[in-house]
Image: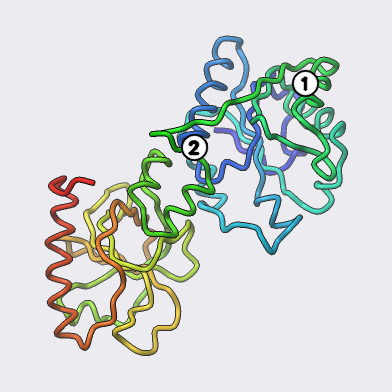
């Protein structure tokens, strides 16, 4: 997939294209349904299937106090967009200056100009330009003059639930990672470099891979989860802990640590992806290491059942 980090990076001869516009936070099933439509249209009409997205949620600039935490990093988002089969993505830096550009400039310079758009897919509530004054109808009128067709997109629902980044974020925050996975079309994940921890798990016979605090992705609620750890393209079953280990003192920040089942791999310094498949139990403060060790044995047994498919939702 071609990736352009600014409008200036788009070559003069790019396109013509079929474009979908959005934040694409999480690149969930709703996003992928739209992307599939864009790809089909592009294939039918000989266009370049393209996403136009932003390097941050616009609220981070316009109303930072209420801006949500992103489900994915920009790197993860670009990887997911590439995996969806798109041919190109333009990631615009959403700055204060960009937010003040007129709707007309957005349509003329970016859609018709840089991307040479012929078809543009947007949601019914799409707004653009200074003070979000541009509407879908404004864009349609613009398209008639600039040579592109505008198609609005219905929201995607699964089991009666609308698929949205907000709903997915809420589910992950509550530990409902299986529900979030249904809406995402994949398990929620975080990715980071494995660093040395306190080695308490090793003392209990459960050595863990501890992620550095600057991991990518949206971390779920504190608790124990069944999941996988992917290293160099290979996924290993794992018991995952999220939280600050309340049984012990001196662990102030939230940690993500994973114990690989039946594997002894030196992961220090490697970048791994931790996938959360199901919630097992909340984080609990135990009286001591012996009580914790007993619980960890029970956790492992349940996690093995979940990962083998014996436990059903």
The residue sitting at 37% across, 45% down in the picture is 181
* Quarter of the figure with residue 29: top left
Query: Which circle marks residue 278 in the picture?
Result: none
Give the residue drawn at x 25%, y 57%: 226
- Comparing 42 with 310, the one in front is 310
| C-alpha distance separating marks 1 and 2 | 26 Å
Between residue 255 and residue 184, name the one nearer to us: 184
- Residue drawn at the location 73% of the way across and 58% of the way down: 63
Q: Quick one: quadrant of the N terminus?
A: top right
The residue at which mark 1 appears reads as 140
Image x and y of residue 300, in percent: 15, 64
Q: Looking at this rendering, what residue extends furthest in the top direction?
A: 44
**Residue 96 to residue 2: above or below:** below
Where residue 125 appears, as percent x and y from the top left, is 68, 34
Instruction: Pick out the residue farthest to the front.
Output: 160
Sequence order check, earlier mark of 1 and 2: 1
Kindly indicate the quadrant of the structure image that contains residue 127: top right
Would you name the residue on which mark 2 appears?
A: 162
């Amino acid at each position: 997939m071609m990736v352009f980090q600014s409008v200036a990076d788009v070559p003069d001869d790019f396109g013509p294209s079929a474009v979908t516009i959005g934040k694409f936070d999480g690149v969930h099933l709703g996003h992928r349904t739209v992307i599939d439509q864009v790809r089909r249209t592009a294939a039918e009409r000989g266009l370049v299937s393209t996403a136009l997205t932003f390097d941050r949620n616009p609220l981070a600039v316009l109303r930072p106090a209420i801006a949500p935490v992103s489900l994915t990093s920009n790197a993860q988002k670009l990887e997911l967009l590439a995996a969806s089969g798109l041919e190109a993505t333009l990631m615009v830096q959403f700055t204060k200056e960009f937010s003040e550009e007129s709707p007309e400039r957005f349509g003329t310079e970016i859609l018709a100009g840089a991307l040479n758009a012929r078809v543009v897919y947007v949601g019914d509530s799409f707004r653009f330009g200074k003070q979000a004054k541009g509407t879908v109808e404004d864009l349609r009128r613009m398209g008639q003059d600039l040579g592109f067709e505008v198609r609005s997109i219905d929201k995607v629902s699964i089991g009666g639930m609308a698929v949205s980044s907000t709903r997915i974020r809420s589910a992950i925050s509550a530990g409902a990672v299986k529900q979030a996975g249904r809406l995402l079309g994949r398990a929620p994940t975080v990715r980071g470099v494995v660093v040395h921890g306190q080695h308490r798990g090793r003392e209990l016979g459960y050595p863990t891979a501890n992620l550095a605090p600057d991991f990518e992705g949206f971390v779920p609620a504190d608790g124990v989860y069944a999941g996988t750890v992917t290293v160099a393209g290979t996924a290993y079953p794992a018991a995952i802990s999220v939280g600050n280990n309340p049984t012990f003192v001196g662990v102030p920040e939230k940690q993500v640590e994973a114990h690989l089942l039946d594997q002894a791999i030196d992961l220090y310094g490697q970048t791994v992806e931790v996938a959360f498949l199901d919630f097992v139990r909340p984080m609990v403060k135990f009286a001591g290491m012996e009580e914790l060790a007993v619980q960890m044995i029970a956790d492992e047994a349940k996690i093995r059942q979940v990962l083998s498919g014996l436990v059903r939702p």
